[in-house]
Amino acid sequence: MDLTDDTPLPMLRDELQFLEGATDGDGQAGFLIFDPVRHRYFRIGLQGAQVLGAWGSGTAGKLIAQLKQKGLSFGLADIDALVRFVTANNLIVGGRGMAEQLVGRNLQAKKSLFTMGLHSYLFFKIPLVRPQRFLDEMFPYIAWLGSRAAMRTILFLTLIGVFLAGQQLDVFFRTFADFANWQGVVLLGVTLVFLKSAHELGHAFVATRYKCQVPVMGVAFMVLFPMLYSDVSDAWRLKNRRQRLMIDGAGMMVEMALGGIALFLWALVPDGPFRTVCFFVATTGWVMSLAINLSPFMRFDGYHLLADGLGIHNLQSRGFAIGRWQLRKLLFGLGEEPPEQFSQRLHRILVAYAWGTWVYRFFLFLGIALLVYFMFFKLLGIFLFVVEIIWFIGLPIFNEMGQWWQRRGEIAKQRRAWVTFSIFGLFLALMFLPLGQSVNVPAVLVAAKEARFHAPVVSQVDEVRVVPGQRVRAGEVLVRLSSPLHREARQRAQLKLVLVDKRLARGGADLEERALRAVLLREAAGLRGELSGLENKVGELVLRATMDGVVSEVAPGLQAGLWVSPELRLVHVVATDAGFSAHGLAAETSVDRLQKGNTGVFISENAGPVKLEVRIDRIGLGNSEGPELVYLASQNGGPVAMDQSADGQRRPANAVYPVLFKVTGSQMSGWLHEQRGTVVVQASAQSIAGRFFRNMVSVLLREAGF
């Protein structure tokens, strides 16, 4: 209902306290409304304080008239805004109609239970203690820690600790290994609890020093990760900016002081759990604290330090309002007045803070959404992931674009807006126009027909008859090998056969001799078979070309007298008249753009500017088992990341598909062994947006496997 002159003003609650607050960064006076029941502070400006000072006038019209008598000019819109403020924050006494308002609020709260439950896992607080009595009793005993003498002593001990630790740096950094077991992890957890408790007590004791109340201390959970907190909102009472800054930074100063003392103690105490604790406090503890708390983009210590340093209360909401105004001015050239007037320097700081916070929180909330996805079982994880993206990233963008839509008439009149629309149109064209008519496929060039020669057993080289580049014919000897085991086995078999033949030559006529002769004949036949097998094995030690071709490679250092194992490739022969082919691995995101018959060029990574014309001969549908797995693996210097399974087999870390390219060009001079490189092949054009969409669908399909 709109406010009129006859509208009665709601009564303010009697227990509310009106206090003079600190001045803003631009020097304007500020005032506070303190609600002792909820221990909450509300900051208002000079005009708000002037209106509330004459609030008991009865009606809005009388209030305006009374203010006018004091030389103050206010309208119904100003009074209406203040009425809405005190009503929304429950600062009024329940009168006529208040029951209906409370019922409405309860209904609204019930409607938001789903939202509250949905996001309570993201951040919620559990109050644990009311520490004020403890703080008051303990403060006289610890007050000396804030003296200059104490701080100088801590600084002196820190410098000594740095000097002593520098004398034994190798021992100092080896202390990291003490955390590599479950006892170290438990010790680390206990130390963290101690440090964070000291951090919060630092805030609380400094607040107590400046006569501020600390009504509660407890633990807050951010994505189920616990963090201690202390309520020092009573610092709003302080007019002295330095005192507020001291409260804001007290926690970090305590941790840094503990770090300096711990470094000094580490150099003195013997090895053991306490020394490990000192190491953690002196290194990781305070560094982690500074890294987290100094950032002003989340509402930790850094945010309050920036707000009090600039003298701007409610920094986030006011900074965001300025940031949105500046964004609209930049994009559309709107001539609206800024939400608040600040100096040029302060205005720029607020804009930088707002825009920086938006970028930071975009990636933070994206990371939180991914964390939530992986924390819960898949179905719930997907649901919560989508909710986080929509609620924390999509909804703020949608709300701002709604404001643009409401101002569409005014925006359309601005020249700056049309420049923005033109740039945005070019961006959309770049995103959605089909571009990129080629695909790079990592590949390895191999001969279509080749032969690799290895020693059948551990052998000694007797003779090497070929050199790289030499032409050979089928059956030509390449390498002669010998094996002492084969030689000794053949000599033993020959000797046994001679002895058996001699016994057979003596013969005999009686029954016993005839029976023995049959046994000897079988033994002789077995020995001749064994000798034949040994002769074949000896023959296998003579490596002969299996086809006409060219020797592309001879094992480095291969010469007579060298012992070789079966794993070593001794000679590689390729048949150049059979042609070459390239075996590639196409990424999942680009394989659907390839078709059989598409042409391209193979570019070797180490053969200079020579290019070979190729054509797609086959596109595989499953995992590759070809030579490309070995040559293109990242473990061998290739571009394709590979994972090794428990059975020792290598598999691509990401989905890839084998593609076989036939070489169609004639520039084959000097290509005698495998060449790793890239095939640049023709492909159907695809837009950047289409590529992104395909990647997204691919990830969703992969992750949706329950």
Image (spheres, helix red, strand yellow):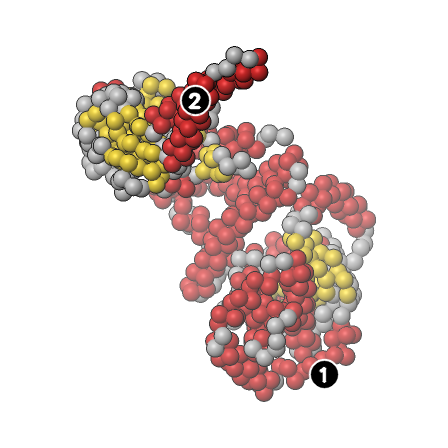
Reading the image, the residue beneath label 1 is: 141
Quarter that holds the N terminus: top right
In this view, the residue in front, 201 or 257, is: 257
Helix or strand or loop: what does disc 1 sit on?
Answer: helix
139 to 445, vertically: above or below: below
Residue in the foreground of this view, choosing between 350 and 639: 639
Q: Residues within 10 Å of mark 1 (few under 14, many from 20)?
A: few
Give percent across and percent down for residue 382.
61, 36
Percent x, y of residue 486: 40, 31
> Residue 83, image x and y in percent?
68, 55
Asked if residue 70 shows in the view, the reply is no
What quarter of the picture does the C terminus occupy? top right
Rendered residue at 35%/23% (across/down): 660
Question: Image height check: is 624 above or below 413?
Answer: above
Q: Amino acid at mark 1?
A: Tyr
Percent x, y of residue 72: 59, 66
Per the image, label 2 sits on a secondary structure element best described as helix
Which of 146/248 is in front? Answer: 146
Q: In the rendered image, which residue does mark 2 sit on?
A: 502
Residue 590 vs residue 366, the one in the foreground: 590
Judge depth for marks 1 and 2 and give the one in front.
Answer: 2
Quadrant in which residue 416 is drawn: top left
Q: CA distance from mark 1 to mark 2?
A: 112 Å
Image point 71% across, 56% down: which residue?
125
Q: Is residue 35 left or right of residue 691?
A: right
Q: Amino acid at mark 2?
A: Lys
**Which numbered disc, 1 or 2, marks the residue that appears first in the sequence?**
1
**Mark 2 crowd level (few <14, some 14–19, many ≥20, 10 Å Cα):** few
